[in-house]
Amino acid sequence: MSMGIYVQVPFCQTRCTYCNFHTGVVARDRYLPYVEAVCREIEQTGNAAAGADTIYIGGGTPSLLEPSALAQVVDQVRRASESEPAEVTLEADPETVTPEKARQWHGAGINRISLGAQSFQDEELKAAGRMHRREDIFRAVDLLRGAGFRNISLDLIAGLPHQTRQSWEESISQLLRILPEHVSIYMLEIDEGSRLGREALAGGGRYGANALPSDDDTADFYDSARLRLQSGGYEHYEISNWGLPGRQSRHNLKYWRREPYIGFGAGAHSFDGFMRWANVHESDRYARLIAQGTSTREQVEPVTPPIALSEDMFLGLRQLRGADFARIEGEYSKEELLHDRLLTLRQRIETLQTHGMLEFDGTFVRIPPEKLTISSEILLELLG
Ligand code: SF4
């Protein structure tokens, strides 16, 4: 088991209509002081990051930062981890990729780019408030390949306003033409705190709430993508993630396998195997606390055995290989207070299995691929 390092960059150029993340559109002169605060936080953590073998720089839109600032962060993590991380991912928006940036990212040791493509349809991108257009995605991939990147992930969103069966299939065809090493597909969840969410509640068409595909259509889009990616040689390994052989995200697998990770930056989450915590969300306050040498942690929660058991099941079932229920039973039955819970779980697994909602071979329990679009309901039934 090895540790992962996550670095949060909470800045964006504009606000996407569906987004309710803790990110802000701020003046560029705020970027560098923030990066310095992150580097100081990494330094202040001492040897807690020792042995980390993955770095993931996410956001927000971290590709907005100067490449030299990103190099500074990567170097700081390298020093703290006292090792050469095997996978260093940067999230990038297509329109932010330039030949110079791509070259410098590669030179800084970043070896994986997660590109927020979201759709190959300009109408959908525009309605979602994205800054890039279809051509920017092809251009960005060419530039990244030219700079030496051999590990690119593309994100798509199913369920965007104006998306139709035809436009979705076309987006998947374009993605398969690019053949990225890794693909993430998310089904849009309408967040009531986003502009699109508020419009969906109040009615209106400014952000395309009146042109949203139905939930059933969105589920069909996901299912169709699942089958086409499978035929295209991708291995489906987590509900929202596919990789060509050997190209699973090493960093993100740590989350689903409950391996430790430390997050740096405003709002970043951490898990050390026993506790979970998050840093304060506001980037100004975060930088102030770091400058004072005061803790930035909040929401510090011990992971008690009942919580660990639920996490183990929930995160295991997000993976296509499933949750190792034989191991889970063996491990958690040492806790007397969990005996009833384990018994209930086994009964519920067997009931859901008879209804075709779960597969259980006596060791691994998993959600059948064709039922993944209703995974939330199945998980609620099992763990609720
Ligand atoms: S780029 Fe990502 S984090 Fe930024 S506003 Fe859009 S969805 Fe939110």
Image: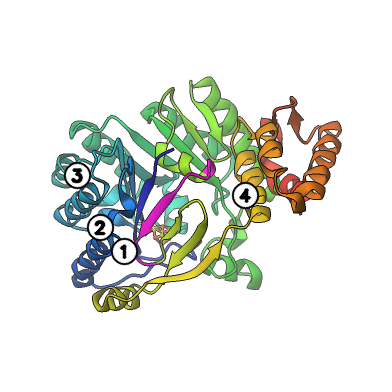
Q: Residue at x 60, y 32 (%)?
A: 320
Q: Which numbered disc, 1 or 4, marks the residue closer to the eye?
A: 4
Q: Residue at x 29, y 56 (%)?
A: 62
> What label does residue 64 carry, if any?
2
Q: Which numbered disc, 3 or 4, marks the residue closer to the eye?
A: 4
Which residue is the site of mark 4? Answer: 311
Which residue is the site of mark 1? Answer: 13
Q: Which portion, as a residue range, is magenta?
A: 256-266
Q: CA distance from mark 3 to mark 2?
A: 12 Å
Q: Amino acid at mark 4?
A: Glu
N-terminal-most mark, 3 or 2: 2
- Asked if one can make out residue 221 in the rendered structure from this viewpoint, the answer is no
Q: CA distance from mark 3 to mark 4?
A: 35 Å
N-terminal-most mark, 1 or 4: 1
N-terminal-most mark, 1 or 3: 1
Q: Which numbered disc, 2 or 1, marks the residue closer to the eye?
A: 2
- Is 16 placed above or below 3 here? below
Q: Residue at x 41, y 24 (%)?
A: 246
Q: CA distance from mark 4 to mark 2?
A: 34 Å
Question: In what element is the residue under mark 4?
Answer: helix
Q: Which numbered disc, 1 or 3, marks the residue closer to the eye?
A: 3
Residues under numbered marks 2 and 1 in contact, where contact means CB atoms less than 8 Å apart: yes
**Is label 2's Cβ within 8 Å of ligand 1?**
no
> What label does residue 105 carry, if any?
3
**Is label 1's Cβ within 8 Å of ligand 1?**
yes
Q: Which numbered disc, 3 or 2, marks the residue closer to the eye?
A: 3
Q: Amino acid at mark 3?
A: Trp
